[in-house]
Image (cartoon, helix red, strand yellow):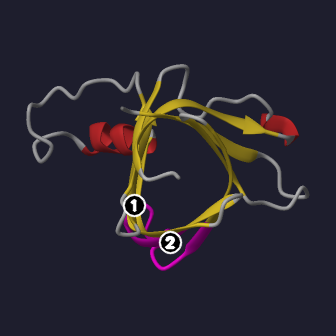
Amino acid sequence: MITGTWRLADYFMEGGAAEGARPLGDTPLGRLLYGADGHMAVQYMDGDRPLMRSASWRASTDEEKLAAVRAFGAYAGRYEWLGDRVVHHVEAGVYPNWIGARLVRLAVLDGDRLTLRADRSPAQPPTPVLVWERIR
């Protein structure tokens, strides 16, 4: 079962010209939470994002805010575990176009390791691959 808290171990692209690209750099950070109640939340980011000059988000410049968000993603909602895939029903998120969307992720659960691939047609490379490790 996937219920629990997961740490992002790796994030890379498969297929096409972006094969092997690392959208969040070599040190991605993230947490993925699957609750027993059917709710989920995920945050993922580049672990090497630069610090902002201001101690306050509101006082930061627009350029600093854009740089911080450019290397960050997050959404939450309900989920369905179907054994070979998980469906995320997005209810809130940093990317407004996903709100109300149904995101299908092909899933391989191997002990405390969960690999999720976006369910895409082979004609639509690249495919994002996120590797998660269970936090105990």
Q: Nearer the viewer, mark 2 or mark 1?
A: 1
Amino acid type shown at disc 1: Met
Q: Is 58 placed above or below 83 here?
A: above
Alpha-carbon neighbours of circle 2 within 10 Å: few (<14), some, or many (≥20)? few
Q: Is residue 52 left or right of residue 44?
A: left
Q: In terms of secondary structure, where does tag 1 sit?
A: strand
Q: Is residue 124 left or right of residue 114?
A: right
Q: Is 111 placed above or below 3 here?
A: above
Q: Which residue is mark 1?
A: 40
Compare residues 95 and 31 and report the one nearer the observer.
Answer: 31
- The Cα–Cα distance between marks 2 and 1, rounded to whole angstroms, is 18 Å
The residue most toward the bottom is 100
Q: Is residue 13 left or right of residue 39?
A: right
Q: Which residue is mark 2?
A: 97
Is residue 94 located in the magenta-colored stretch of the structure? yes
Residue 119 position by quadrant: bottom right
Q: What are the residue bounds of the magenta stretch? A: 88-103
Residue at the image point whose x is 80% and y is 33% from the top: 19
Alpha-carbon neighbours of circle 1 within 10 Å: few (<14), some, or many (≥20)? many
Residue at the image point whose x is 35% and y is 69% from the top: 37
Residue 56: percent from left, percent from top: 9, 39
Q: Is 99 placed above or below 68 here?
A: below
Residue at the image point whose x is 91% and y is 58% from the top: 123
Residue at the image point whose x is 37% and y is 27% from the top: 49
Residue 101: percent from left, percent from top: 54, 76
Amino acid type shown at disc 2: Asn
